[in-house]
Amino acid sequence: IYILAIESSCDDTAAAVLENNKVLSNIVARQSIHEEYGGVVPELASRAHQQNIVPVIDVALKKANIDKSQLSGIAFTQGPGLMGSLLVGSSFAKSMALALNIPLVAVHHMHAHVLAHFIEEEGFDKPEFPFLAMTISGGHTQIIKVKSFFDMEVIGETTDDAVGEAFDKSAKILGLPYPGGPLIDKFAAEGNPKAFQFTKPKVDGLNFSFSGLKTQILYFIQKNVAQNPNFIQENKNDICASIQYTIIQILMDKLKLAVAETGINQIAIGGGVSANSGIRATLKEGEQKYGWKTFIPKFEYTTDNAAMIGIVGYHKYLENQFEDASVVSKARIEF
Ligand code: ATP
Ligand code: FE
């Protein structure tokens, strides 16, 4: 089975071709236009998708060495995401499926971040059901009990900002360009995580909160910069390491609780923030420390990509879960 997958939920235009559960090509066109605005500008994003989508799909097919006549089905991101961005991908997927007379498969973006672990990759094990998935991304922070490919239950989530926003907004306070998560990661590697202390929010159960941390960091920076205008430059690595350390502790506390409550000790992380080297290392430590079995996706399947849409597309294809051209994009969809 050959699936062409298209992902355009936010600011990256991505296409991939899968042969069953193997990735033949995985192409992403990143949009740098948003950097100077300090965040994604929806209107600019959809315009860039329109420019990128044809060449990106073209390259994905060429790199996979597949002609479009060989495709079995087309998978696309139905949502959640920016409406203008989603529409570019869905319109293209619909027309192409119609023209080729092959099935159309709609994919939930967060479902894809979870099932990215089922892409066949040398050196990467697949989790067994049931397992816990922690999706940490630009728009989501959830702990999910995954019972099968299609049966998942959200058992905890953020009540305000997502963890990716916590990274990006902290970075913005430090004057770093968008998206700042990867930069915090980079500077944190050279810093002392215990240099500055931030308090963790008190949230009941398996839910998260990150907006208080952001405010705390803002006041901390304002206070110190008032005393020393060079405070950020002089302490950049330590500040980043301390912020990252606090975020990791927040995530780990909830994971430990989730394991205790469910009795499940297989943990898979997904979403853009799972690219973070501190989170990866700390989770790995959990294998020895707590007897967990952890699953950390290959780097290219963490931030938005179409391969993850393709693996969900493949499993839905096997179950004949198809859509007709009347399927609508959704900026928000329950999981
Ligand atoms: P969602 O998946 O919730 O719809 P999204 O698709 O916009 O949101 P992703 O592409 O999955 O988000 O993740 C992007 C986020 O990941 C950004 O907030 C970015 O800063 C963060 N991120 C990427 N790499 C790192 C890293 N190394 N350390 C910390 N954060 C990172
Ligand atoms: Fe995402």
Image: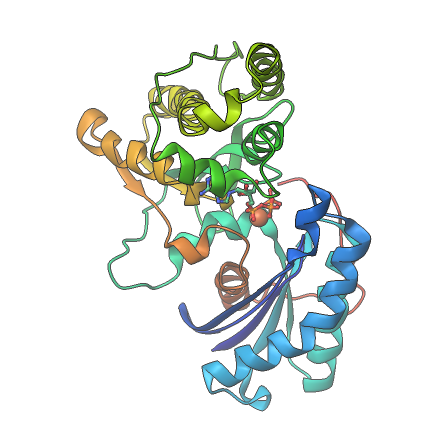
Where is residue 252 shown, x and y percent of the image?
38, 24
Q: Quadrant of residue 238?
A: top left
How many labels were placed on the picture?
A: 0
- Relative placement, left or right, of 331 versus 112 is right
- Relative placement, left or right, of 124 versus 89 is left
Q: Residue at x 73, y 44 (%)?
A: 37
Coloration mode: rainbow
Give the quarter of the figure containing the C terminus.
top right
- Relative placement, left or right, of 255 versus 320 is left
Q: Residue at x 58, y 35 (%)?
A: 168
Residue 36, above or below 264 = below
Where is residue 95 shown, x and y percent of the image?
76, 77
Q: Quadrant of residue 166?
A: top right
Where is residue 21 shown, x and y percent of the image?
40, 67
- Relative placement, left or right, of 284 versus 61 is left
Where is residue 199 shown, x and y percent of the image?
48, 10
Q: Residue at x 50, y 59 (%)?
A: 308
Q: Residue at x 52, y 65 (%)?
A: 310
Residue 111, above or below 327 = above
Judge by depth and name the residue closer to the eye, 118 or 230. 230
Residue sitting at the far left:
288
Residue 90 in view here: no
